[in-house]
Amino acid sequence: MTILTQSRADLLSDYRPEDSFFFRSAGHALLAEGTAAVVPTCNSAGGAADALVRRVRTTLAEAEAAGQPRPIVVGALPFRPVTPARLRVPATVRWTGPMAAQAPPPALPARFGSLRHVPSPDDYRSGVTAALDRLADGPARKIVLARALYLEGVRHHGVAAMLRRLAHGNPDGYVFAFDLQPGRILLGASPELLVRRSGGRVTANPLAGSAPRHADALADARAGERLLASAKDLREHAVVVEAVAEGLRPYCLDLEVPDTPSLLRTPTLWHLSTVVRGHLRDPEVTSLHLATALHPTPAVCGTPRTLAMRAIGEIEPFDRSFYSGVVGWTDSSGDGEWAVTIRCAEVADREIRVYAGAGVVEGSTPDAELAETTAKFRTFLRAIGIEQDL
Protein backbone atom coordinates (compact mmCIF):
# COMPACT_ATOMS: atom_id res chain seq x y z
CA MET A 1 0.00 0.00 0.00
CA THR A 2 1.30 3.42 -0.95
CA ILE A 3 0.71 6.14 1.64
CA LEU A 4 1.04 9.74 0.57
CA THR A 5 0.84 12.61 3.03
CA GLN A 6 -0.34 15.90 1.56
CA SER A 7 -0.84 19.04 3.59
CA ARG A 8 -3.29 20.86 1.32
CA ALA A 9 -4.43 18.43 -1.33
CA ASP A 10 -8.12 18.53 -2.16
CA LEU A 11 -8.92 14.84 -1.83
CA LEU A 12 -12.54 15.52 -2.71
CA SER A 13 -11.61 16.19 -6.32
CA ASP A 14 -10.10 12.69 -6.62
CA TYR A 15 -12.97 10.79 -5.01
CA ARG A 16 -14.43 8.13 -7.32
CA PRO A 17 -17.56 6.19 -6.30
CA GLU A 18 -17.11 2.41 -6.03
CA ASP A 19 -13.31 2.69 -5.92
CA SER A 20 -12.76 5.20 -3.10
CA PHE A 21 -13.35 5.46 0.64
CA PHE A 22 -13.44 9.01 1.98
CA PHE A 23 -13.36 10.00 5.66
CA ARG A 24 -12.91 13.51 7.06
CA SER A 25 -12.67 14.51 10.72
CA ALA A 26 -11.65 17.80 12.31
CA GLY A 27 -7.98 16.76 12.42
CA HIS A 28 -7.43 15.17 9.03
CA ALA A 29 -8.95 13.62 5.94
CA LEU A 30 -8.13 10.42 4.10
CA LEU A 31 -8.91 9.06 0.67
CA ALA A 32 -8.38 5.31 0.32
CA GLU A 33 -8.46 3.82 -3.18
CA GLY A 34 -8.52 0.29 -4.53
CA THR A 35 -8.39 -2.93 -2.55
CA ALA A 36 -5.26 -4.76 -1.43
CA ALA A 37 -7.09 -7.18 0.89
CA VAL A 38 -10.58 -7.77 2.28
CA VAL A 39 -11.12 -8.61 5.94
CA PRO A 40 -12.87 -12.03 5.96
CA THR A 41 -16.63 -11.72 6.42
CA CYS A 42 -17.52 -11.57 10.08
CA ASN A 43 -20.21 -9.92 12.17
CA SER A 44 -19.64 -8.04 15.41
CA ALA A 45 -22.24 -9.68 17.66
CA GLY A 46 -21.28 -10.98 21.09
CA GLY A 47 -18.15 -13.15 21.00
CA ALA A 48 -17.90 -12.54 17.24
CA ALA A 49 -16.67 -9.02 18.02
CA ASP A 50 -13.42 -10.52 19.32
CA ALA A 51 -13.18 -12.64 16.18
CA LEU A 52 -13.65 -9.52 14.05
CA VAL A 53 -10.86 -7.71 15.90
CA ARG A 54 -8.56 -10.74 15.44
CA ARG A 55 -9.33 -10.95 11.72
CA VAL A 56 -8.56 -7.28 11.27
CA ARG A 57 -5.29 -7.69 13.17
CA THR A 58 -4.36 -10.73 11.08
CA THR A 59 -5.22 -8.99 7.80
CA LEU A 60 -3.10 -5.99 8.74
CA ALA A 61 -0.18 -8.23 9.79
CA GLU A 62 -0.35 -10.09 6.47
CA ALA A 63 -0.40 -6.81 4.57
CA GLU A 64 2.63 -5.58 6.51
CA ALA A 65 4.47 -8.88 5.90
CA ALA A 66 3.75 -8.46 2.18
CA GLY A 67 5.70 -5.21 2.24
CA GLN A 68 2.94 -2.64 2.66
CA PRO A 69 4.12 0.15 4.99
CA ARG A 70 1.73 1.24 7.73
CA PRO A 71 -1.32 -0.58 6.36
CA ILE A 72 -4.76 0.48 7.54
CA VAL A 73 -8.23 -1.02 7.43
CA VAL A 74 -11.13 1.20 6.37
CA GLY A 75 -14.85 0.55 6.27
CA ALA A 76 -17.97 0.29 8.36
CA LEU A 77 -19.98 -1.76 10.83
CA PRO A 78 -23.78 -1.99 10.39
CA PHE A 79 -26.40 -1.10 12.99
CA ARG A 80 -27.28 -4.70 13.79
CA PRO A 81 -24.16 -6.63 14.82
CA VAL A 82 -25.47 -9.85 13.24
CA THR A 83 -24.94 -8.23 9.80
CA PRO A 84 -21.39 -8.66 8.40
CA ALA A 85 -19.07 -5.67 8.54
CA ARG A 86 -17.51 -4.24 5.37
CA LEU A 87 -13.79 -3.73 5.99
CA ARG A 88 -10.79 -3.74 3.66
CA VAL A 89 -7.13 -2.81 3.30
CA PRO A 90 -6.95 -0.23 0.49
CA ALA A 91 -4.29 -0.29 -2.20
CA THR A 92 -3.40 3.38 -1.66
CA VAL A 93 -4.15 5.94 1.03
CA ARG A 94 -3.69 9.69 0.91
CA TRP A 95 -3.91 11.87 4.01
CA THR A 96 -4.24 15.59 4.55
CA GLY A 97 -4.31 17.77 7.60
CA PRO A 98 -7.46 19.76 8.39
CA MET A 99 -9.27 20.72 5.20
CA ALA A 100 -9.53 24.47 4.60
CA ALA A 101 -12.99 25.91 5.25
CA GLN A 102 -14.79 26.82 2.04
CA ALA A 103 -18.29 27.86 1.15
CA PRO A 104 -20.21 24.94 -0.32
CA PRO A 105 -20.52 25.03 -4.11
CA PRO A 106 -23.85 26.22 -5.51
CA ALA A 107 -26.63 23.69 -5.17
CA LEU A 108 -27.77 21.82 -8.26
CA PRO A 109 -31.15 20.54 -7.09
CA ALA A 110 -31.87 16.87 -7.54
CA ARG A 111 -35.11 15.99 -9.27
CA PHE A 112 -37.15 12.97 -8.36
CA GLY A 113 -40.25 11.25 -9.67
CA SER A 114 -41.81 10.11 -6.41
CA LEU A 115 -41.34 10.27 -2.65
CA ARG A 116 -42.21 7.68 -0.01
CA HIS A 117 -42.09 8.16 3.75
CA VAL A 118 -41.13 4.86 5.43
CA PRO A 119 -43.03 4.71 7.73
CA SER A 120 -45.63 7.36 6.94
CA PRO A 121 -45.69 10.34 9.34
CA ASP A 122 -48.87 9.00 10.99
CA ASP A 123 -47.34 5.53 11.37
CA TYR A 124 -44.18 7.06 12.83
CA ARG A 125 -46.26 8.89 15.43
CA SER A 126 -47.98 5.60 16.23
CA GLY A 127 -44.57 3.96 16.60
CA VAL A 128 -43.50 6.62 19.09
CA THR A 129 -46.69 6.00 21.06
CA ALA A 130 -45.96 2.25 21.07
CA ALA A 131 -42.41 2.95 22.30
CA LEU A 132 -43.77 5.22 25.09
CA ASP A 133 -46.08 2.40 26.17
CA ARG A 134 -43.09 0.07 26.44
CA LEU A 135 -41.17 2.63 28.48
CA ALA A 136 -44.12 3.02 30.83
CA ASP A 137 -44.20 -0.75 31.37
CA GLY A 138 -40.40 -0.78 32.08
CA PRO A 139 -37.57 -1.61 32.31
CA ALA A 140 -36.60 0.07 29.01
CA ARG A 141 -35.43 3.67 29.50
CA LYS A 142 -34.96 4.80 25.90
CA ILE A 143 -35.87 3.52 22.41
CA VAL A 144 -34.54 5.23 19.28
CA LEU A 145 -36.94 5.10 16.34
CA ALA A 146 -35.86 5.97 12.80
CA ARG A 147 -37.65 6.74 9.59
CA ALA A 148 -36.60 7.18 5.99
CA LEU A 149 -37.37 9.18 2.88
CA TYR A 150 -37.21 7.15 -0.34
CA LEU A 151 -36.68 9.43 -3.33
CA GLU A 152 -37.32 7.37 -6.46
CA GLY A 153 -36.78 8.14 -10.11
CA VAL A 154 -34.01 10.52 -9.01
CA ARG A 155 -31.89 12.62 -11.33
CA HIS A 156 -28.96 13.86 -9.27
CA HIS A 157 -25.58 15.36 -10.07
CA GLY A 158 -23.40 12.54 -8.81
CA VAL A 159 -22.05 11.27 -5.51
CA ALA A 160 -18.87 13.35 -5.80
CA ALA A 161 -20.89 16.58 -6.05
CA MET A 162 -22.98 15.62 -3.01
CA LEU A 163 -19.84 14.71 -1.05
CA ARG A 164 -18.26 18.08 -1.80
CA ARG A 165 -21.37 19.95 -0.61
CA LEU A 166 -21.55 17.84 2.56
CA ALA A 167 -17.87 18.43 3.34
CA HIS A 168 -17.92 22.18 2.80
CA GLY A 169 -21.40 22.65 4.26
CA ASN A 170 -20.52 20.76 7.48
CA PRO A 171 -16.97 21.90 8.28
CA ASP A 172 -16.86 20.30 11.74
CA GLY A 173 -18.60 17.04 10.84
CA TYR A 174 -17.31 13.53 10.21
CA VAL A 175 -17.88 13.35 6.47
CA PHE A 176 -17.81 9.92 4.83
CA ALA A 177 -18.52 8.04 1.62
CA PHE A 178 -18.13 4.29 1.10
CA ASP A 179 -19.64 1.62 -1.10
CA LEU A 180 -22.22 -0.71 0.41
CA GLN A 181 -22.39 -2.74 -2.79
CA PRO A 182 -21.85 -2.01 -6.48
CA GLY A 183 -23.98 0.96 -7.42
CA ARG A 184 -24.96 1.93 -3.84
CA ILE A 185 -22.96 4.38 -1.70
CA LEU A 186 -23.49 5.41 1.94
CA LEU A 187 -22.81 9.12 2.15
CA GLY A 188 -23.12 11.45 5.12
CA ALA A 189 -21.88 14.15 7.50
CA SER A 190 -22.13 12.89 11.06
CA PRO A 191 -21.68 15.17 14.08
CA GLU A 192 -20.90 12.23 16.39
CA LEU A 193 -17.57 10.61 17.21
CA LEU A 194 -18.07 7.11 18.61
CA VAL A 195 -14.44 6.65 19.67
CA ARG A 196 -10.89 7.69 18.77
CA ARG A 197 -7.68 6.02 19.91
CA SER A 198 -4.41 7.90 19.54
CA GLY A 199 -1.55 6.12 21.27
CA GLY A 200 -2.79 5.54 24.80
CA ARG A 201 -5.40 8.30 24.64
CA VAL A 202 -9.09 7.50 24.16
CA THR A 203 -11.80 10.03 23.25
CA ALA A 204 -15.54 9.61 22.76
CA ASN A 205 -18.13 12.31 22.10
CA PRO A 206 -21.68 11.05 22.70
CA LEU A 207 -24.51 13.27 21.53
CA ALA A 208 -28.17 13.07 22.56
CA GLY A 209 -30.80 15.75 22.79
CA SER A 210 -31.20 18.16 19.88
CA ALA A 211 -33.07 21.23 18.68
CA PRO A 212 -33.42 22.88 15.25
CA ARG A 213 -31.26 25.91 14.43
CA HIS A 214 -32.86 29.24 13.42
CA ALA A 215 -31.83 31.83 10.86
CA ASP A 216 -32.49 34.64 13.35
CA ALA A 217 -29.49 34.88 15.69
CA LEU A 218 -31.53 35.70 18.80
CA ALA A 219 -34.04 32.89 18.21
CA ASP A 220 -31.16 30.53 17.49
CA ALA A 221 -29.38 31.38 20.76
CA ARG A 222 -32.62 30.93 22.70
CA ALA A 223 -33.14 27.50 21.10
CA GLY A 224 -29.71 26.44 22.34
CA GLU A 225 -30.42 27.80 25.83
CA ARG A 226 -33.75 25.95 25.98
CA LEU A 227 -32.03 22.72 24.98
CA LEU A 228 -29.47 23.12 27.77
CA ALA A 229 -32.32 23.58 30.25
CA SER A 230 -34.62 20.84 28.92
CA ALA A 231 -35.22 18.18 31.59
CA LYS A 232 -36.32 15.66 28.96
CA ASP A 233 -33.23 16.19 26.77
CA LEU A 234 -30.87 16.21 29.75
CA ARG A 235 -32.29 12.83 30.87
CA GLU A 236 -31.86 11.44 27.37
CA HIS A 237 -28.29 12.72 27.21
CA ALA A 238 -27.35 11.36 30.63
CA VAL A 239 -28.46 7.85 29.62
CA VAL A 240 -26.11 7.92 26.62
CA VAL A 241 -23.12 9.35 28.49
CA GLU A 242 -23.56 6.81 31.28
CA ALA A 243 -23.54 3.93 28.77
CA VAL A 244 -20.45 5.21 26.93
CA ALA A 245 -18.56 5.74 30.19
CA GLU A 246 -19.49 2.24 31.41
CA GLY A 247 -18.42 0.78 28.06
CA LEU A 248 -14.99 2.47 28.20
CA ARG A 249 -14.26 2.08 31.90
CA PRO A 250 -13.00 -1.56 31.75
CA TYR A 251 -10.40 -0.50 29.16
CA CYS A 252 -9.17 2.70 30.79
CA LEU A 253 -6.88 3.52 33.70
CA ASP A 254 -8.79 6.74 34.22
CA LEU A 255 -11.82 8.38 32.67
CA GLU A 256 -12.79 12.04 32.59
CA VAL A 257 -16.57 12.48 32.31
CA PRO A 258 -17.87 16.08 32.65
CA ASP A 259 -20.83 16.50 34.99
CA THR A 260 -22.88 18.57 32.54
CA PRO A 261 -23.12 18.67 28.73
CA SER A 262 -22.18 21.53 26.45
CA LEU A 263 -23.77 22.68 23.20
CA LEU A 264 -22.50 21.46 19.84
CA ARG A 265 -23.78 23.19 16.73
CA THR A 266 -24.17 21.94 13.19
CA PRO A 267 -25.60 24.00 10.32
CA THR A 268 -29.08 22.60 11.03
CA LEU A 269 -29.18 21.48 14.68
CA TRP A 270 -28.06 22.13 18.24
CA HIS A 271 -26.92 19.02 20.13
CA LEU A 272 -26.15 18.27 23.76
CA SER A 273 -22.55 17.04 23.75
CA THR A 274 -20.17 15.49 26.27
CA VAL A 275 -16.53 14.74 25.50
CA VAL A 276 -15.30 11.68 27.45
CA ARG A 277 -11.52 11.17 27.73
CA GLY A 278 -9.34 8.45 29.19
CA HIS A 279 -6.06 6.53 29.00
CA LEU A 280 -5.84 2.91 27.93
CA ARG A 281 -5.06 0.25 30.49
CA ASP A 282 -3.79 -2.24 27.86
CA PRO A 283 -1.92 -1.00 24.74
CA GLU A 284 -3.12 -4.08 22.84
CA VAL A 285 -6.71 -2.77 22.86
CA THR A 286 -7.40 -1.25 19.44
CA SER A 287 -9.76 1.46 18.28
CA LEU A 288 -11.90 -1.22 16.61
CA HIS A 289 -12.05 -3.18 19.86
CA LEU A 290 -13.37 -0.06 21.59
CA ALA A 291 -15.84 0.64 18.78
CA THR A 292 -17.36 -2.85 18.97
CA ALA A 293 -17.57 -2.57 22.76
CA LEU A 294 -19.57 0.66 22.54
CA HIS A 295 -21.71 0.13 19.43
CA PRO A 296 -24.64 0.59 19.27
CA THR A 297 -24.85 3.24 21.98
CA PRO A 298 -28.17 4.47 23.41
CA ALA A 299 -27.83 7.47 21.07
CA VAL A 300 -28.87 5.31 18.10
CA CYS A 301 -30.44 2.28 19.79
CA GLY A 302 -31.68 2.89 23.32
CA THR A 303 -31.21 1.23 26.66
CA PRO A 304 -31.10 -1.47 27.87
CA ARG A 305 -29.64 -2.40 24.49
CA THR A 306 -31.34 -5.80 24.10
CA LEU A 307 -34.81 -4.46 24.89
CA ALA A 308 -34.36 -1.40 22.68
CA MET A 309 -33.07 -3.49 19.78
CA ARG A 310 -36.08 -5.80 20.09
CA ALA A 311 -38.49 -2.85 20.10
CA ILE A 312 -36.82 -1.33 17.03
CA GLY A 313 -37.14 -4.63 15.17
CA GLU A 314 -40.84 -4.83 16.02
CA ILE A 315 -41.77 -1.18 15.40
CA GLU A 316 -39.57 0.00 12.50
CA PRO A 317 -40.76 -1.23 9.08
CA PHE A 318 -37.34 -1.27 7.37
CA ASP A 319 -33.81 -2.63 7.77
CA ARG A 320 -31.40 0.11 8.87
CA SER A 321 -28.45 -1.66 7.19
CA PHE A 322 -25.44 0.66 7.76
CA TYR A 323 -27.47 3.66 8.89
CA SER A 324 -26.71 4.23 12.62
CA GLY A 325 -23.70 1.95 12.33
CA VAL A 326 -20.11 3.19 12.49
CA VAL A 327 -17.58 4.21 9.84
CA GLY A 328 -13.85 4.86 10.07
CA TRP A 329 -10.41 3.32 10.08
CA THR A 330 -7.84 1.54 12.21
CA ASP A 331 -4.13 0.93 11.63
CA SER A 332 -1.63 -1.76 12.61
CA SER A 333 -0.72 0.12 15.82
CA GLY A 334 -4.36 0.04 16.95
CA ASP A 335 -4.92 3.75 16.47
CA GLY A 336 -8.05 4.79 14.61
CA GLU A 337 -11.21 6.83 14.54
CA TRP A 338 -14.85 5.72 14.24
CA ALA A 339 -17.88 7.96 13.73
CA VAL A 340 -21.56 7.10 14.01
CA THR A 341 -23.26 6.86 10.59
CA ILE A 342 -26.06 9.39 11.05
CA ARG A 343 -27.14 12.38 8.89
CA CYS A 344 -26.65 10.10 5.93
CA ALA A 345 -28.27 8.49 2.91
CA GLU A 346 -27.87 5.52 0.61
CA VAL A 347 -27.35 6.82 -2.91
CA ALA A 348 -27.93 4.75 -6.06
CA ASP A 349 -28.25 5.78 -9.69
CA ARG A 350 -32.01 6.39 -9.57
CA GLU A 351 -32.81 6.22 -5.86
CA ILE A 352 -31.79 8.01 -2.66
CA ARG A 353 -32.79 6.82 0.82
CA VAL A 354 -32.33 9.46 3.53
CA TYR A 355 -32.43 8.37 7.19
CA ALA A 356 -33.07 10.07 10.53
CA GLY A 357 -33.94 8.94 14.05
CA ALA A 358 -35.05 10.33 17.39
CA GLY A 359 -34.69 9.06 20.93
CA VAL A 360 -37.97 8.25 22.69
CA VAL A 361 -37.76 8.73 26.46
CA GLU A 362 -40.17 9.69 29.23
CA GLY A 363 -41.54 13.09 28.26
CA SER A 364 -41.29 12.51 24.49
CA THR A 365 -44.29 13.29 22.29
CA PRO A 366 -45.06 11.83 18.84
CA ASP A 367 -45.23 15.27 17.20
CA ALA A 368 -41.93 16.42 18.70
CA GLU A 369 -40.07 13.27 17.62
CA LEU A 370 -41.49 13.57 14.10
CA ALA A 371 -40.32 17.19 13.98
CA GLU A 372 -36.86 16.17 15.21
CA THR A 373 -36.42 13.62 12.44
CA THR A 374 -37.62 16.17 9.90
CA ALA A 375 -34.93 18.59 11.09
CA LYS A 376 -32.29 15.88 10.88
CA PHE A 377 -33.19 15.14 7.25
CA ARG A 378 -32.13 18.68 6.33
CA THR A 379 -28.38 17.97 6.50
CA PHE A 380 -28.53 15.59 3.57
CA LEU A 381 -31.39 17.22 1.67
CA ARG A 382 -29.35 20.44 1.50
CA ALA A 383 -26.47 18.45 -0.02
CA ILE A 384 -28.71 17.52 -2.94
CA GLY A 385 -30.10 21.02 -3.31
CA ILE A 386 -33.48 20.49 -1.62
CA GLU A 387 -34.11 23.27 0.88
CA GLN A 388 -37.74 22.59 1.83
CA ASP A 389 -38.87 19.88 4.24
CA LEU A 390 -40.27 16.79 2.54
Image: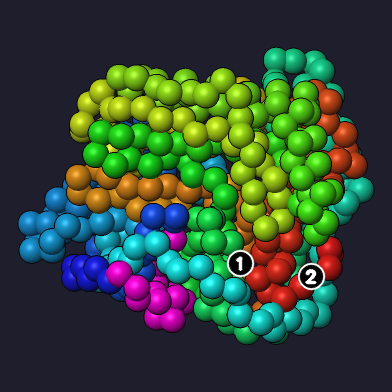
Dividing the image into 4 quarters, which one contains the N terminus? bottom left
State whether residue 175 is above or below residue 340.
Answer: below
Q: Quadrant of residue 355?
A: bottom right
* Residue type (three-letter) at the residue carrying disc 2: Glu
State whether residue 14 is above or below residue 302.
Answer: below
Provide the residue span drawn in magenta. 7-24
Q: Quadrant of residue 136?
A: top right
SS class, disc 2: loop
Q: Residue furthest front?
A: 218
- Please say whether residue 142 is one of the residues in the magenta stretch: no
Left or right of 35 in this view: 203: right
* Residue type (three-letter) at the residue carrying disc 1: Gly
Depth check: give the residue in front, 376 or 294.
Answer: 376
Dividing the image into 4 quarters, which one contains the C terminus? bottom right
Left or right of 38 in this view: 172: right
Which mark, residue 387?
A: 2
What residue is shown at x 20% (from left), y 49% (from top)? 332
What residue is shown at x 56% (from left), y 69% (from top)? 168
Give percent across and percent down for residue 159.
Answer: 55, 77
**Which badge, 1 or 2, is on the more N-terminal residue?**
1
What residue is shown at x 57% (from left), y 79% (from top)? 161
SS class, disc 1: helix
- Near mark 1 (Cα within 10 A), the count class, few <14, some 14-19 or many ≥20, is many
- Near mark 2 (Cα within 10 A), the count class, few <14, some 14-19 or many ≥20, is some
State whether residue 231 is above or below residue 214.
Answer: above
What residue is shown at x 14% (from left), y 50% (from top)? 61
Q: Is residue 163 visible?
A: no
State whether residue 243 is above or below residue 116.
Answer: above
Which mark, residue 169?
A: 1
Left or right of 37 in this view: 20: right
Q: Is residue 164 visible?
A: yes
Give percent across and percent down for residue 32.
Answer: 33, 68
